[in-house]
Amino acid sequence: MNETSVAEEAERYLQILADPRSEPAPTECLACFVARMLRDFGCDTTLRWAQRFRDLRSPTATGLERRLGNVGGFCDCEIFLNGYRLRRELLVRDLATDELEAPVDPPPCAGVRRTSTRPCANWERRSRYDTW
Ligand SMILES: [Zn+2]
Ligand SMILES: [Zn+2]
């Protein structure tokens, strides 16, 4: 990355932070927030959206990165690749492939306590043998 693109990336990030959509809604959970941010802004191979959620909503949750790492989430998109998926009931069947897929319009967050960093009832662990 050259200096210009570093500056541009920093500028872009500041613009995102100034956008009211980049803040979690009052009872929105970490998983729904991070999924929403990934859809709009992508993953930068860090936990920046999970950390932003924590900083805004639950600054004392200092074990968050370790907890996400325990489910294979070392960056924002890995939280979903390895850690959590939408519950089966919320998926829709793709008529072409007959596979269950996440709906184009994500379901509204089921809501969590304001300081919670846990996923809401829309999400389940990819492996049922691990615990959050
Ligand atoms: Zn990622
Ligand atoms: Zn949620």
Image (cartoon, grey):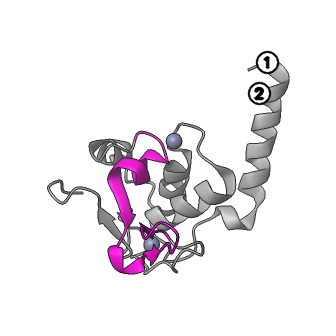
- Which secondary structure lies at badge 1? loop
Q: Residue furthest top?
A: 2
> Is 20 placed above or below 7 here?
below
Q: Which mark is residue 49?
A: none
Question: Is 108 placed left or right of 91 in the picture?
Answer: right
- In magenta stretch: residue 99: yes
* Label 1, label 2: how far apart the Cα atoms are: 6 Å
Point out residue 68 in the picture as x, y percentages from the top left corner. Answer: 35, 47
Q: Name the residue under label 1.
A: 2
Residue lying at the far right of the rendered structure: 4
Q: In this view, does 71 lie above or below 58?
A: above
Task: Please state, as top left, top right, bottom left or bottom right, where the N terminus lies in the image.
Answer: top right
Amino acid under label 1? Asn
Q: Position of residue 93 (x, y in %)?
A: 45, 76
Total numbered labels: 2
At label 2, the amino acid type is Val
* Quadrant in which the C terminus appears: bottom left
Label 2: how many residues lie within 10 Å, few (<14), some (14-19) or many (20+)? Answer: few
Chain part drawn in magenta: 74-102
Residue 47 percent location from the top left of the image: 50, 43
The x and y percentages for residue 61 are: 37, 53
Task: Confirm or deny contact between disc 1 and disc 2 (CB under 8 A).
Answer: yes
Q: Is mark 1 within 8 Å of ligand 1?
A: no
Which numbered disc covers residue 6? Answer: 2
The quadrant of the rendered image in which ligand 2 is seen is bottom left
Magenta-colored stretch includes residue 132: no
Image point (35%, 64%), residue name? 118
Horizontally, residue 110 falls left or right of residue 69, namely: right
In the image, what residue occupies the spot 52% across and 80% down? 108
User: Would you call the spot at circle 1 few (<14 residues within 10 Å), some (14-19), or many (20 or more)?
Assistant: few
